[in-house]
Structures are given as structure tokens and as C-alpha cells.
Image (tube, rainbow, N blue to C red):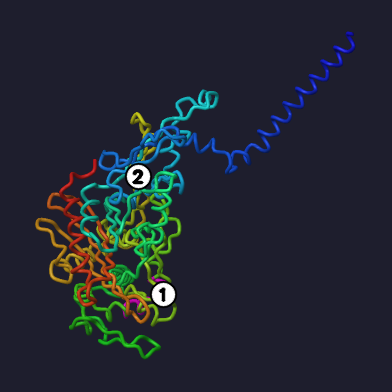
Amino acid sequence: MTRHIRHAGVFCALLLAALLVNTAWLQLVHGPSYGGNPANRRPTITRYEQPRGQILVGGRPVTGSRDTGEQLRYERTYAEGPLYAPVTGFASQRYGTTFLEHAEDPVLSGTDPMLAGFPPWNDFTRGQAPGGNVVTTLDPAAQRAAFTGLGSRKGAVAAIEPTTGRILALVSTPSYDPAELSGNGPAAAAAWARLNADPEQPLLNRAVRQTYPPGSTFKVVTAAAALDSGLVTDLDEPTDSPDPFRLPGSTTRLVNEGEGCEDASLRYAFEFSCNTVFAKLGVDVGAEAMRTAAQGFGFDDPDLRIPFSVTPSTFDAPADPAQRALSSIGQFNTRATPLQMAMVAAAVADGGQVRAPYLVERTTRSGGGTVSAAGSRPVRQVMRPTTAVRLRELMYDVVAEGTGRNAAIRGATVGGKTGTAQHGVGNKGTPYAWFVSWAQGEEDMDPRVAVAVVVEDASARRGDISGGGTAAPIARAVMEAVLRSPPAG
């Protein structure tokens, strides 16, 4: 009998060992595949079993969570969703996350290890920390001014604090309400289908994900290259610039909208946007110097993140002089996002320095304790300080006496550059209206804000579209909003 008991005991021990080996095999080898299997709903249920953290603008949350009482318990809500959609993006139970909701998902969902108070205990209990909060750099007044200014037109606005790189406004229109996509039912599916089928592309973030020909606003870059290279030493000295200007190696003649551009000085050419002068400057500066100047401002940078990715702006500096002439006035293959052109204006305002733009001031635990902060930002000197001073003078003249008068603000120093960018086959498309600018209040030590505005207004008459008439008033409203707000810190 003892022998039979012993055999049974050994058999049971073998069964137990086999069970342990099989369990270990399943957990260690097959566990990841089971965890990622679409049929496994446990991770999804866990993800939505607690409220998501908040995204804050001006100290106020613009997001929230609603208890649905369903298996996927908490659903994302948005305050003034269309106003902040280009910043927050959406957090959908069905379609995932975008923009800040995606870039800061570990903090907002509570899965960031930095949120865990005592990781070994959390591993033992399998508890999840409450979602943390994301504090943005946005100025709510500037954001609203940009959104209201664009109104029903397609376009985008980006505003930056030049001395820090803080993004003060980021607007894209037409917009949408992210709350429509939060759930996973038929209503979310219908909203998704409608938004994706809309020819106006409300889901497209035009401020950071759409590039446009920058038109004459790119002349800021060309002027910087000409001044830094020593090609131009006196703002008021006549240039050797014929009108019309025959593009080198071709029969195409470039003309100007206005008069007085033949041999015009850089000051006059900048103030009244003479294409012929800047096209010839681009040819004379040379491909390498033009490429260096553009890349210094941030063109051709595939790694820019704010923290979500930004579509690279491009300047290919063609070796062909005729093509380079057109590229140097913001046409041909030159493309830029509104954020990139705000960086160009900010560099002029900040003494020739480009600071990496950023949208998140800090992240915090649900109780308010700081998890991470933006800290100091990389600085790149892209032109001589003396060049920046002269460019500020040129941009000031545009607003004081030239094509940018609609951006003037009483009691403030404002500089700007207008642009009307041609596009489409044979340049037959409705032009894009551009304006880039910066502003400094009477009591400010440095410029407080740099802005870029682009407007696509297909309903307007072609002759009525201009950077000064269409985009400059929007930039002025944004700059006024920032100058009325107390300085950060």
C-alpha cells in the first residue's frame, strides 16, 4: 500500500510541475501575444476604468471624463472642443489618440512610471496610478482671438513667445469637436465617417501638419541671408535689380505688383514686397548660403516635436538659378507650416536666436505635484545680432508705412511682413494670404509675441486677397491679446 501511495504522490508532483511549467510557458513566452490579441479586452477595460487626467489652459481644464456606467466606463469630454482641438487632439475608445492626448498619453492615462508612488507595491497590487495632468503654454485670450479672427475661413495661426519658445496659440480652421469621437458606439462611427469625408478636412491640423508656399513672408529669410553674407551692407543703397527681372537661363520675366522696384533699396523692396529684388538676391547669395540660412531658421528639420510631430518645412535651394530665384520669394518648391513662419518672426524678434517651440509647460500628478517641467530650451543663433536689428527695422517699416499697416497697435512696437502666395496649376488657384509679425509693449524689455497667420479663402475675389488686408488683422488681434495678458512668470 505504501508503494502505491508513493507512486501516486510522485505522479501528483509531476502533474503539479507540469502545470507550473505550462503556466510559466504561457506567461513568459505567449503572454505578450495573448496580451496584444484583439480578442483580449482586459487591457482596454483597464484603460477606461478610471478618469483620464486633465489638459489645462491658463490654469483651467479644457478636458474631462464622463462616467458612462458601461464596461468601458469613462469617456473623454471636452470644454470648447473646436477651439482647442488642434492642441488636445482626441482620445477615442474606438479610434485612439492624437496630438497632446497621444503624446502625453502615459501621464494622462496614469501609466507613466513617474506617477507611481511606490512601484513594488503597485506591481504587487496591480493598481494603476490616477491620471496626471498636462499644463500647456497656451494663452487662452490669444487662442480665442486667433479662432475668432479666422472665423469660417480655412487657415491657421501660430503664436510664440520669442524669448522662451512657449507656444501661445495654435489654431486651425475649420475645426471639429473631439467629444464626437470619444465613445465607441454608432454615434462616434458616424462622426468619424462624416469628418473624414468632409472636403474641408476639419481633422487636418493646418498649423503644424500642412505646408504652404510662404510667398513674400519668406523674404525675411532671403533678407537675412543677404545681410549676413555681406551682399547688402546698406538698407538704403540702391540694388542692381531690373524690373522686370528675366530669370537666368530662361525667357520668363518676373514682374512686381507695385511700382518703383527697379534698383530699389532693400528697405523699399521689403516694405513694398518687390519680387524682382529678392529673386535676384536669392540668385546672387548662392544656393549654399540660402540653404544654410533657411535650415538655420528650422526648414528641412524632420525631428521637430512640440511634443507631437510637426511636418517639416522645406527649402531645397535649387542649383538652377531660375528655380532658386523663385524659391527665394517663397514660391517654386518652398513650403512652410505656420509654426515654422512664426519661428522665423520669433528669431528676428529675439536677436537672431531660434528657440525650440514647446507646448507643454509641465506635467503633474493628480494632486498637483510636478512630474516633469519644460526646463531650458535649446537656442540656435541663426543670424548675426546686427542682422536681426536691421530686420526688425525693416519689419517695423512694413507696419508703419508699408503693406502691413493693418497690424499696427497703438502704444506698441510692431514689425511684420505680408505675403500673397500663388499656387495651383499655372498659379490659377486662389492665393494664400500670409502675415508674420512680432509685437513689443511699451513697458516690455523684449518682444512678447511672434505670430504667423495663413488664410485660405476660396470664396473671396482673387483681387481682394492680400496678406495685409486678410491676414494682418488676425495677427493684430492675437498680438493685442498677448500684450494685454500679464507676462508669464
Q: Quadrant of residue 327?
A: bottom left
Height in image: 393 above or below 89? below
> Viewed as shown, does residue 375 lie left or right of 241?
right
Is 400 left or right of 334, judged from the image as shown?
left
Q: What range of the chain is rendered magenta?
A: 280-290
Eye-nearest disc, 1 or 2:
2
Q: Residue at x 47, y 30 (%)?
A: 128
Q: Secondary structure at mark 2?
A: strand
Disc 2: CA contacts within 10 A as few (<14), some (14-19) or many (>=20): many
Residue occupied by mark 1: 287
Q: Amino acid at mark 1?
A: Ala
Residue 280 versus residue 22 in the image, above or below? below
Residue located farthest toward the front when viewing the structure as drawn: 186
Mark 1 / mark 2, whichever is N-terminal: 1
Q: Which mark is residue 360?
A: 2
| Image disc number at residue 378 | none
Would you call the spot at circle 1 few (<14 residues within 10 Å), some (14-19), or many (20 or more)?
A: some
Expressed as whole percent of the image width and height from the top left, the position of residue 69 reads 41, 33
